[in-house]
Image (cartoon, helix red, strand yellow):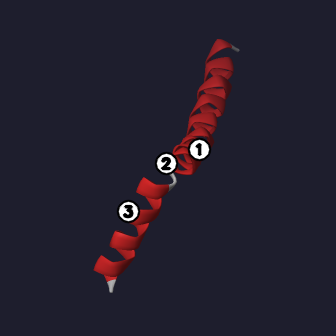
Amino acid sequence: MLRDVFRYAMKVLTEKKFRAVLTIIGISIGPLALVMMTSTVRGYANYV
């Protein structure tokens, strides 16, 4: 069952490459924004 899901996911990713790239970029932006916000707040806290 898990193998079928993995095959289907790989099939969809290879068929719709542009959509897959956009999804990966979108998922990456969230954690990146969180890290940047945390770093900025800690930097200001250390400065003050």
Q: Hey, which residue is sitting farthest front in the picture?
A: 15
Residue 41 against residue 28 in the figure, above or below: above
Task: Work out whether mark 2 precedes mark 3 in sequence or the reverse, and give the earlier one.
Answer: 3
Q: Give the crowd class for mark 2: few <14, some 14-19, many >=20 residues within 10 Å.
A: few
- Mark 2 in CB contact with mark 1 (< 8 angstroms): no
User: To which residue does mark 3 refer?
Assistant: 10
Q: Give the crowd class for mark 1: few <14, some 14-19, many >=20 residues within 10 Å.
A: few
User: Is disc 3 placed on a helix, strand or loop?
Assistant: helix
**Tag count in the figure?**
3
Residue 37, how many percent across, how many down? 66, 31
Task: Work out whether mark 2 precedes mark 1 in sequence or the reverse, and give the earlier one.
Answer: 2
User: Is disc 1 placed on a helix, strand or loop?
Assistant: helix
Residue 7, how many percent across, how many down? 34, 71
Could you tell me which residue is drawn at 40 percent across and 72 percent down? 8
Checking the image for residue 3, the label placed there is none
Q: Which amino acid does label 1 sit on?
A: Leu
User: To which residue does mark 1 refer?
Assistant: 22
Residue 33, quarter of the rendered image: top right
User: To which residue does mark 2 refer?
Assistant: 17
The one nearer the camera, 19 or 29, is: 19
Image quadrant in which the C terminus is located: top right
Could you tell me which residue is drawn at 67 percent across and 22 percent down? 45
- Mark 1 in CB contact with mark 3 (< 8 angstroms): no
Residue 30 against residue 5 in the figure, above or below: above
Task: Work out whether mark 1 precedes mark 3 in sequence or the reverse, and give the earlier one.
Answer: 3
Q: What residue type is labelled 2?
A: Lys
Residue 48 against residue 38 in the figure, above or below: above
